[in-house]
Image (cartoon, rainbow, N blue to C red):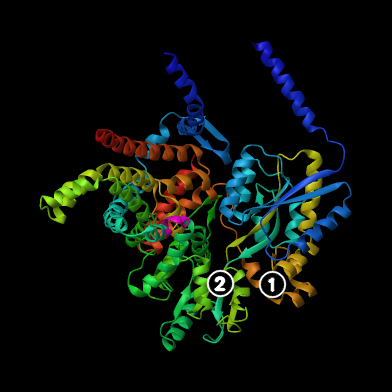
Amino acid sequence: MKARSQAALLAAPAMAILAGVAVLPVLAAIWLSLHRSILVFHEERFIGIANFRFLFSDGRFWSALGTTAYFTAVAVAAELLIGLPVAMLLQRGGGFFRAAILLPWAIPTAVSARMWAWLFNADYGLLHRLLPGVDWLGSPRTALHAAILVDVWKTTPFVALILLAGLSAIPGDVVKAARVDGARPARIFFSITLPLLRPAILLALLFRSLDAFRVFDAIYVLTEGGPANATETLSIYAYKTLLRSGDFGYGSALSVATFACVLGIGLVFLRFLGRER
Amino acid sequence: MKRHLLVLVACLACARQGREAQPPGPVTIVLEHQPLWGDPAAFHASLERFQQENPGVVVRTQTLPNASDVAREMFLTALEGGADDFDVFAIDVVWAPEFARAGWLADLTSAFPPERLRAQYLASTIEAVTLDGKIYAVPWFLDVGLLYYRTDLVPRAPKTYAELQSFARAAMARNPGLAGYLWQGRQYEGLNCNVFEAIWGHGGDLLRDGRIALDTDAARAGLGFLREAIASGLSPRSVVASAEEETRRAFQDGRAVFLRNWPYVWAEVQKPGSPVRGKVGFAPLPSETGAPGPGTLGGWQLAVNAHSPPWRRRAAEKLVAFLTSGEAAVELALRYSRIPARRAVYDDPRVREGAPFIAALLPVALAARPRPVTPYYALASDSIQGELSGAVAGLRSPADALSRAQRIVDHLESR
């Protein structure tokens, strides 16, 4: 009993900080989302769930949600598919390669997005010269894929690093034993490496999905959500509504919706991760 | 309980009163403005002069972030919180009606009577700072959309859209690979400026009875012209993703005949080493009729914080008067290439001599028009951008996009 209360006492400061910086702001946003709050017009009144009712009929919200989901699914899948072979190569490579591959991850997103914007530029861009005819940022269909490409370029190293850690944790004896038993490399990969790598893969998926779902900076710098809102994600829509338009009530409702989605994704992954233990 | 509350309220009232009384010593006022670029020494010297002329007043300056969006966020949160730690601040031309409506800007009508301002300043700049007949800010310097053209490729500046088209086509036929007309079609505030200019150029008006009107014949013609420019190859597809710098660079590299942009481009294209140095002219935008086409008015105004206490407000008004004087405007033009909002400055011999480009901008400045002067503009601007972008990118017809934009605007204005 004494040990328990002591543990609670020791954990209290951390819990208080968590509550202060995480729980309270979320509750405040939820509270604000139940209001009509437009700064400039001094409107501030409780309207219950009216913002959410509007949200459900708001085409721009659904389109932003679809864009965000598509971005997350495609970007994270690509990062995982490219990150795994990269991790396996890195396992053989030395420290130099491990450091070098982290370069895209180390560059601030706003800077690298600006750089990519020039690569995509339809008059000067290198990519435009390599693939003339593709209008990277100017067409609603390709603009989102351009953003996905930037995200994949930037965060694949991060995924690779997590997977590398997972690979290093696989005991060499198991692989050796399989070889002695005459298993081919493909068989070893699918029957030993992949199953033992599951926790690392889930962890990478969790981190990346949560991050990708809240994507803001790369897309904001590349297109600001255009053309025709085709690359507008939930975060960008919420930002524009909150800070450009000054509609704090509806902007908060959008933020809360984003939060709910992220929370849902997080819980699903944590469930899978929990099962691993 | 009730009594406690009363005591508390009384105490708060006392505290408030305490703050209202003027503290002894000099009055310190704070000026917040965006960086002026160039050596700040000249500007600081002029503030020094102001302090000598007004003993007992100390001016401190704070520099705002250069991005207009970020500065706006700062002001939104600070002013909504009732911040009174700055007295005079520079606001973007589109914020004036919104901030005034919110009650964040001191009413300057008595210190700066509208009739006097109208006599001294370009009409559009005063229109932009007037809400319900009251003055809420004083124009500091302006910005305006204009047309750049290649003097070696076309005979003269085009006056009409038809001329723009035929001049560009002729030059493009002689020089394959050349783009005709560059403008800014990316989904951002600059797109609104470009489309509004095309609408005005087709005889349109963006305000009807104080409300934003987009579903009009002139608007369909204006937006239709821009879309058709892309579809017909007059403008390259790249304009759909272009902001100012992308188009400026292409024009400066000699890849285009015409460019719609802001005055800052002039200094860039005339720099030593610029491939088009000495081959560029500028003019008001074209229009349907051949009259100078209106360019969107941008630029900065000086406002006084409504939360400033009275004794600081008087000093603040004096500072605004000082910074927006004719002399200050001449200095801004000469030292910082800022374009005057006062009519007389364009004829000042010092400006004609030292900044001939600015003196020559008068016809462009006279044709400038503000974006819809309504508190709802900032609220609606972002949604308008999305719809206009849809038309420019060819996703839907201009008529369709404009009626969608109108529906959103009506919805916003109705609440």
Question: Dot 2: within a 10 Å radius of its alpha carbon, few (fewer than 14), some, or many (20 or more) residues?
Answer: many
Which dot marks residue A261?
Answer: none
Quadrant of the image occupied by residue A185: bottom left
Q: Is residue A17 left or right of residue B344?
A: left
Residue type of the residue flagged with mark 2: Leu
Is B366 placed above or below B411 here?
A: below
Q: Is residue B252 above or below residue A120?
A: below
For mark 2, give the secondary structure.
loop
Quadrant containing the N terminus of chain A in the rendered view: top left
Q: For the magenta stretch, what is the residue range?
A: A103-109
Residue carrying label 2: B285
Residue A194 in view, yes or no: no
Q: Nearer the viewer, residue B270 or B342?
A: B270
Q: Nearer the viewer, residue B23 or A264?
A: A264
Q: Residues within 10 Å of mark 1 (few under 14, many from 20)?
A: many
Label 1 is found on which chain of the structure? B
Q: Nearer the viewer, residue B84 or B221?
A: B84
Residue B74 makes an appearance in the image: yes
Q: Could you tell me which residue is drawn at 75 percent across and 55 percent down?
A: B115
Which residue matches tag 1?
B358
Q: Main secondary structure of the magenta part?
A: helix
- The residue furthest left is A182
Three-letter code, disc 1: Ile
